Image (cartoon, rainbow, N blue to C red):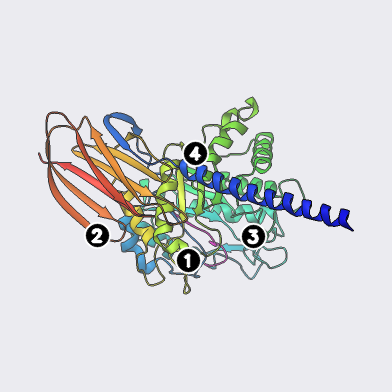
């Protein structure tokens, strides 16, 4: 009994030592983790130009929140953001495009879809079409996510879509024609790998490759059309097997692939740029050489693939700017922020159902202050990042302090060097709507510097405009 008691006491002592050591190690690791965080000390040499800005954030996507007219009440707000393209899906099932006549022949009517397309044009953007979902008149089982009963009928519908929206003789919206109908994108389906949208395969059975084949067949048959782009595979994330199998099939069948697209939702802003790094690595083989320089498009992206109230806060706004800061240097053609407008219930919108602006909307307007040439930024920290540009007589900088834990506060030293001497108007805008202006004189040293206090998840823009 004494032996057992003694062993038990020894066991308890050892256990306590282990627990104390573990707690001490955890505290030490936590301390080291916090100590390893890098504070920002930003320097922008106005003579160090990284290249022309790509404006890849000037792209927005709208989900299927309403059957028609969903953009009609927000075209003014949308035009302020100056998107290059607005992506829309549900084009076949929401707008009664496809039907059959008395003899069972396929008929197309784009009049209802034209209304939404014209709202996009009225906002000075171009449409980016998602070819889907399956019209009931074609569907193998009447659902919106099945394969068609007849693949040639699907190809015919795609042909008529391209002829209508890219036609050389087409006139839309009372006068939209010519160059406005050039460079229209057609994306084959939406998240085909997701069960909600049909659970298509890339290996056989209900095969996305077949869907792509007949989509390209139809698009290629279009007559009297302007230049346009067709592509995919628009999966829920960038999957290596999907992408490479898709491209090998396109090579085998000699199919057009004019752009590569996928979706990505993540709170981690580095994930988006990692996609581009991964793709570069995956396409190094000589068999993929002709696909390496295709436009790359994230056709939906955001904080969370499920509706999340955080997306409507300053955290969502800071996430938007920090993500774009990473993507703007990655050679990405466009990143379509999801989505333009809520449905009747709050969803992912940068605008509410009735058109009220949310923090992410203001974040995009602040990014739009950047124009011309991108300037190199040095001294970014763990949380604080910046984008800078120069055009004519204006220097612009957008700062962001993205911290998901909502705790990081920094007083950031900021220096702009080699600034052209002169008198400037400095305008400062904050994500909460506060703004200020002051006159700044830059002397012969060409140095402008000051400290900028950034609260957690704040976004601040500077515009330094020289008086002429």
Q: Earlier in the sequence, mark 2 or mark 1?
A: 1
Q: Earlier in the sequence, mark 4 or mark 2?
A: 4
* Rendering quarter of residue 365: bottom left
Dominant SS in magenta: loop
Residue corresponding to mark 3: 197
| Residue under the image location 37 percent in, 61 percent down | 359
Q: Earlier in the sequence, mark 3 or mark 2?
A: 3
* Label 1 residue SS: helix
Residue corresponding to mark 2: 434
* Label 4 residue SS: loop
Res 123 visible: no
Viewer-proximal residue among 268 and 35: 35
Viewer-proximal residue among 159 and 264: 264
* Label 3 residue SS: helix
The disc at residue 295 is 4
For the residue carrying disc 4, how many other residues have a C-alpha within 10 Å: few (<14), some (14-19), or many (20+)? some
For the residue carrying disc 1, how many other residues have a C-alpha within 10 Å: few (<14), some (14-19), or many (20+)? few
């Amino acid at each position: 009994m004494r032996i057992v008691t003694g062993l038990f006491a020894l066991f308890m002592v050892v256990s306590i030592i282990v627990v104390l050591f573990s707690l001490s190690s955890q505290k030490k690791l936590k301390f080291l983790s916090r100590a390893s965080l890098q504070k920002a000390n930003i320097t922008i040499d106005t003579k160090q130009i990284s290249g022309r800005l790509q404006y890849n954030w000037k792209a927005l996507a709208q989900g299927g929140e309403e059957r028609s007219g969903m953009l009609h009440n927000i075209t003014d707000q949308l035009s302020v953001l100056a998107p290059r393209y607005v992506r829309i899906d549900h084009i076949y099932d929401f707008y009664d495009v496809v039907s059959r006549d008395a003899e069972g022949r396929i008929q197309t009517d784009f009049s209802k879809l034209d209304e939404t397309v014209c709202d996009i044009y009225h906002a000075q953007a171009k449409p980016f079409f998602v070819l889907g979902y399956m019209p009931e008149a074609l569907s193998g089982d009447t659902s919106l996510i099945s394969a068609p009963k007849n693949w040639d009928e699907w190809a015919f519908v795609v042909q008529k879509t391209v002829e209508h929206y890219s036609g050389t003789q087409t006139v839309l919206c009372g006068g939209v024609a010519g160059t406005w109908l050039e460079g229209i994108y057609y994306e084959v389906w939406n998240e085909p790998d997701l069960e909600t949208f049909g659970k298509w395969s890339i290996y056989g059975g209900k095969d996305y490759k077949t869907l792509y084949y007949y989509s390209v067949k139809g698009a290629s048959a279009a007559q009297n059309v302007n230049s346009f782009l067709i592509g995919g595979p628009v999966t829920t994330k960038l999957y290596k097997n999907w992408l490479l199998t898709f491209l090998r099939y396109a090579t085998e069948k000699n199919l057009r692939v004019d752009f590569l697209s996928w979706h990505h939702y993540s709170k981690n802003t580095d994930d988006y740029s990692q996609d581009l790094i991964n793709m570069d690595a995956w396409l190094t083989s000589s068999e993929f050489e002709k696909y390496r320089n295709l436009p790359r498009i994230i056709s939906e992206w955001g904080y969370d693939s499920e509706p999340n109230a955080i997306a409507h806060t300053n955290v969502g706004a800071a996430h938007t700017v920090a993500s774009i800061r990473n993507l703007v240097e990655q050679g990405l053609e466009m990143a379509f922020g999801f989505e333009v407008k809520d449905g009747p219930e709050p969803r992912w919108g940068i605008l509410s159902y009735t058109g009220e602006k949310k923090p992410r909307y203001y974040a995009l307007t602040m990014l739009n202050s950047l124009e011309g040439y991108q300037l190199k930024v040095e001294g970014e920290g763990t949380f604080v990042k910046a984008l800078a540009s120069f055009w004519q007589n204006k220097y612009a900088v957008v700062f962001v302090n993205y911290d998901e834990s909502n705790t990081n506060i920094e007083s950031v030293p900021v220096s702009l060097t080699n600034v052209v001497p002169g008198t400037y108007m400095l305008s400062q805008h904050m994500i909460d709507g506060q703004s200020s202006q002051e006159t700044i004189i830059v002397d012969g040293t060409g140095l402008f510097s000051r400290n900028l206090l950034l609260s957690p998840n704040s976004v601040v823009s500077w515009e330094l405009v020289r008086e002429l």
